[in-house]
């Protein structure tokens, strides 16, 4: 079903795969450039049927300067170049008409945001101005004018955004709409703004031009709209002229994870089902669909008619073509890390991808065959080494990879264990498949010595030797049980009942959560107990949120998770609170005894009892080979954590770039 054609009004799509609008911050001043064109052209050539571009600003009040502009005729020329390139590459293209309302930052727009009511925004921490009737009419006409520009620019359709907590959502919700005129109060009045926008756009673009609606399937905001109200609005939207409903999850300020790894694959497809059962037009399912079998099952189960692949197409533009050809192992799946995409958007930086170092750089990097195939040795089988080996082999070099452990993966093996991080294991599966297909010789349990490397005679050596956990920076009495976090994560150490994690960075927080979840109900058991009404909901909630260990995090500085991205840190903090993990920050560990930890805070010392102390105090680079091999091999490159311990993004990018530099 995934590759069956489908019609959206009069527009025929070659398959059921769409790419939703994602902010990329590629367009300073809103103008289309070669970077944006090549980015979308690449994904069109990869086999997706419909690319929805945006958000595209309908005015300067509810949008930002790094978003794609659609609020002035001066943008039409560049947009026309974009639509021409995408269509020539084999896809259809739509423009998302964007107005953020109270989600607009005044520091970006240069003026106070406008919204249905002057209610402070938890997202921007600002209070918008209440829209007058003149403001409402002006914004509606801005939607219309933008839609006409999109049509003139060659877009095959427009999408009106009524999701994520943006302006139309704000009119729909009793939480953000406290008006007493025709646009507030009753459900019918709260629907009026969104429906009039749709009706006005329909009247101007004509009866046959497709109009899409991006809809929050459930706001996940207390007191706001649920899937029931979303379905009711979808029904009225269809009557007003919408040809397709594109269903996503909640608002930006919701406390339910929307796209992080905590959400199961296709976990919000049920929201699309609620809309599909109410309307007659096609419906798209969204959020965490990074696997072709998941996408196919959603369609087979009748939950939706199409699926969105957003971040999965950033990670692998060729996902659709590979899936159609049955080459599932070659798909580089999105690992839901959010490091390069959502974290970048929320900090107004250009989007990149942790697992795809070409994303957003398609216009500046061209992978070419090696001018002279060499024997290349990669030392280290973590993400940096795996990517270096893949790219070097792809360019035509003869590649051998040495790994001192008994299996590949390096830090990936540990990164995939904590809650919400299981998708990291798919990246290792991808590399294993690709290196095998490319003929890379993999030698495990191989300790790399400088003499052996020199004797190997490689034309280029890439050192991806990674990092090792830092030792305890305080005295430890024997036989106190003090272990690195990695040994807990991989299961080689079973922590005692009283576990103390020293270090409140990403590793420490995730390790603490992993320990705190030991003994909690599994998803399978929870499903069984609910189906059979075996326990009261309060009992199930307690068993789900309380494990068999008492867990404490001790952090030297104020606060936790300073190295965790903005889009995921709040989820980690939520899990720490949910699981009852105790946090002691601004506290120094003086020593570990057989009874526990001696802590110092504000000059006073206390004893914290512990059975197991887990160290998450950083790592140090393992790069001694670099100095030993200097000027002793023809080409030498140092990449990843061997340079400095960082995130997976830098490791993969440096491995990729090193392989490109080999002559």
Image (spheres, rainbow, N blue to C red):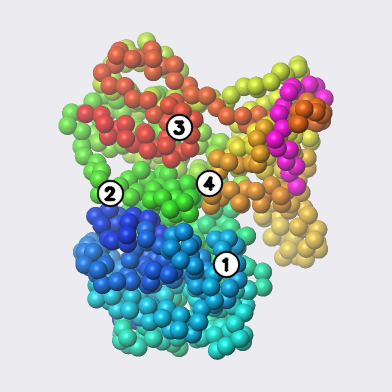
**In this view, the mark in front (2 or 3):** 2
How far apart in space, not on screen, are marks 4 and 2 (Cα)?
Answer: 25 Å
The span from disc 1 to disc 2 (Cα, nearest Å) is 40 Å
Question: Could you give the CA–CA distance between mark 2 and mark 3, rounded to whole angstroms?
Answer: 25 Å
Q: CA distance from mark 3 to mark 4?
A: 22 Å
Q: Which residue in the protein does label 4 denote?
A: 565
Mark 1 highlights which residue? 127
Real-space CA distance between mark 1 and mark 4, rounded to the nearest whole angstrom: 26 Å
Q: Mark 1: which secondary structure?
A: loop
In front: mark 1 or mark 4? Answer: 1
Q: Residue at x 41, y 14 (%)?
A: 449
Relative image position of residue 352 (x, y in whole percent):
39, 48
Give x and y (percent) for residue 461.
Answer: 32, 22
Whole-number angstrom distance, CA of label 3 to CA of label 1:
47 Å
Task: Based on the picture, tell me whether residue 588 belongs to the magenta stretch.
Answer: yes
Residue 267 at x, y percent in the picture: 56, 61
Per the image, is 545 magenta?
A: no
Location of the N terminus (image quadrant):
bottom left
Residue drawn 38% across the image and 82% down it: 141
Tell me the residue at 32%/45% (across/down): 358
* Residue 44 placement (x, y as % from top left): 29, 60
Q: Which residue is labeled 2 in the image? A: 362
Q: Which mark is residue 585?
A: none
SS type, badge 2 = loop
């Amino acid at each position: 079903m995934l590759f069956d054609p489908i019609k959206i009004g009069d527009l025929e799509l070659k398959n059921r795969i769409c790419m939703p609008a994602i902010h990329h911050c590629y367009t300073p001043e809103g103008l289309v450039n070669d970077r944006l064109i090549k980015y979308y052209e690449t994904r069109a050539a990869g086999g997706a049927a419909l690319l929805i571009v945006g958000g595209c600003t309908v005015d300067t009040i509810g949008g930002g300067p790094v978003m794609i502009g659609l609020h002035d005729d001066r943008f039409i020329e560049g947009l026309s170049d974009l639509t021409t390139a995408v269509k020539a590459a084999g896809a259809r293209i739509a423009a998302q008409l964007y107005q953020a309302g109270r989600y607009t930052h005044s520091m970006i727009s240069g003026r106070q945001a406008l919204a249905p009511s002057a209610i402070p925004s938890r997202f921007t921490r600002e209070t918008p101005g209440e829209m007058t009737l003149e403001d409402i009419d002006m914004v509606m006409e801005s939607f219309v004018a933008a839609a006409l520009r999109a049509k003139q620019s060659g877009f095959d359709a427009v999408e009106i955004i009524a999701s994520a907590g943006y302006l139309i959502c704000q009119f729909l919700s009793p939480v953000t709409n406290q008006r007493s005129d025709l646009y507030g109060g009753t459900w019918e009045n709260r629907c009026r703004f969104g429906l009039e926008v749709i009706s006005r756009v329909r009247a101007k673009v004509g009866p046959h031009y497709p109009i899409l609606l991006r809809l929050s399937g459930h706001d996940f905001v207390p007191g706001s709209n649920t899937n029931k109200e979303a379905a009711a609005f979808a029904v009225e939207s269809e009557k007003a002229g919408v040809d397709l409903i594109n269903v996503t999850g909640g608002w930006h300020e919701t406390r339910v994870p929307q796209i992080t790894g905590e959400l199961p694959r296709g976990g919000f497809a049920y929201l699309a089902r609620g809309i599909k059962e109410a309307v007659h037009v096609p419906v798209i399912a969204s959020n965490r669909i990074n696997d072709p079998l998941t996408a196919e099952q959603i369609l087979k189960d009748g939950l939706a008619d199409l699926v969105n692949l957003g971040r999965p197409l950033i990670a692998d533009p060729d996902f659709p073509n590979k899936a159609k050809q049955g080459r599932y192992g070659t798909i580089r799946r999105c690992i839901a890390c959010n490091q390069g995409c959502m974290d970048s958007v929320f900090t107004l930086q250009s989007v990149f991808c942790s697992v795809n170092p070409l994303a957003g750089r398609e216009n500046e990097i061209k992978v070419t065959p090696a001018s002279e195939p060499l024997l290349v040795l990669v030392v280290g089988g973590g993400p940096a080494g795996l990517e270096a080996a893949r790219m070097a082999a792809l360019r035509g070099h003869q590649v051998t990879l040495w790994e001192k452990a008994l299996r590949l993966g390096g830090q990936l093996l540990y990164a995939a264990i904590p809650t919400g991080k299981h998708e990291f294991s798919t990246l290792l599966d991808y590399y294993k498949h690709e290196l095998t297909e490319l003929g890379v010789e993999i030698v495990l349990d191989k300790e790399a010595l400088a003499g052996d490397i020199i004797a190997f005679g490689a034309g280029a050596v890439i050192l991806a030797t990674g990092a090792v956990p830092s030792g305890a920076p305080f005295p430890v009495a024997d036989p106190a049980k003090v272990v690195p976090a990695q040994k807990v994560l991989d299961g080689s150490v079973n922590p005692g009942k009283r576990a103390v994690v020293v270090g409140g960075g990403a590793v420490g927080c995730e390790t603490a959560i992993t320990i705190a979840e030991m003994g909690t109900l599994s998803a399978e058991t929870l499903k069984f107990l609910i189906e059979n009404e075996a326990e009261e909901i309060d009992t199930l909630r307690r068993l789900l949120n309380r494990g068999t260990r008492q867990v404490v995090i001790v952090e030297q500085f104020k606060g936790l998770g300073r190295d965790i991205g903005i889009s995921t840190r709040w989820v980690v903090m939520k899990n720490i609170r949910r699981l009852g993990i105790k946090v002691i920050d601004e506290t120094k560990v003086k020593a570990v005894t057989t009874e526990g930890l001696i802590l110092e805070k504000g000059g006073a010392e206390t004893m914290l009892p512990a059975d197991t102390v887990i160290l998450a105090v950083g790592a140090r680079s393992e790069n001694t080979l670099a100095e030993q091999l200097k000027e002793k091999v023809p080409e030498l490159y140092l990449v990843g954590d061997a340079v400095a311990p960082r995130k997976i993004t830098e490791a993969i990018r440096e491995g990729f770039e090193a392989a490109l530099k080999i002559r």
